[in-house]
Image: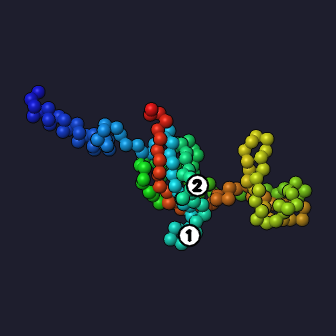
Amino acid sequence: MTARDFSLACAAALLAACSQGESSNGSGVQPLSVSDGMQVSIEYTLRLKDPKDGEIYDTNVGGQPMVYTQGGGQLVRGLERALEGMAIGERKQVVVPAADGYGEVNPLHVSEIPKELIPPDARKVGTEFQTAPRHGHRIQMKVKEIKKDTIVMDLNHPLAGKTLYFDVRVVGLHDPRRR
């Protein structure tokens, strides 16, 4: 193989690597991006209406970042999917429909409970509280309606049926598989 043929072969290999999205930071080490198994630190702001006119529902900006493991099901599905491939410092606005967030409101999660099973101070429409049954999973409940002998309880997640508007920024990445 001549020097010219070798140069052409190297150039072709480099072009092939670039066209497949491979890149390097000059040190031969691939830059980290959000992928399954990565520990990801994010800042986020959540609104329940379009960010142009929606008030903030929750945020951690100015506080501690949220840390989660990508692919571990620790975030709502739509947000986790949108974060895939992002790099440190990257920001994104993400709209998560209810089906990819906390799900649609399920009418089967609304039930009537005898009034005497609910503490007297919680017998007001809109009161929210949690119970911890024997299997250990906390259940959030909300008083939906007061009847003569029963109380209608809604066990749907408070954000069920809502579109979620996130402004999110990746602030840290750690690959526990790399040493």
On the picture, is 175 further left or further right than 113? Answer: left
Is the residue 2 above or below the residue 30 in the image?
above
Q: Give the x, y percent position of residue 156.
A: 70, 56
Q: Earlier in the sequence, mark 2 or mark 1?
A: 1
Residue 162 location in percent, x, y? 61, 61
Front residue of this view, candidates 101 and 35? 35
The image shows residue 154, relative to residue 38, as above or below, that is below
Amino acid type at circle 2 is Gly
- For image coordinates 42% across by 45% down, the residue present is 33
Of 105 and 95, the residue lying toward us: 95
The amino acid beneath tag 1 is Gly
Helix or strand or loop: what does disc 1 sit on? loop
Quadrant assignment, res 16: top left
179 vs 138, nearest the viewer: 179
- In the image, residue 6 sits, relative to residue 169, either above or below, namely above
Q: Which mark is residue 54?
A: 1
x 47%, y 55%: residue: 169
Q: Find disc 2 in the rendering and name its residue.
A: 101
For the point 28% across and 44% down, which residue is it? 19
Name the residue: 79% across, 66% down. Answer: 125
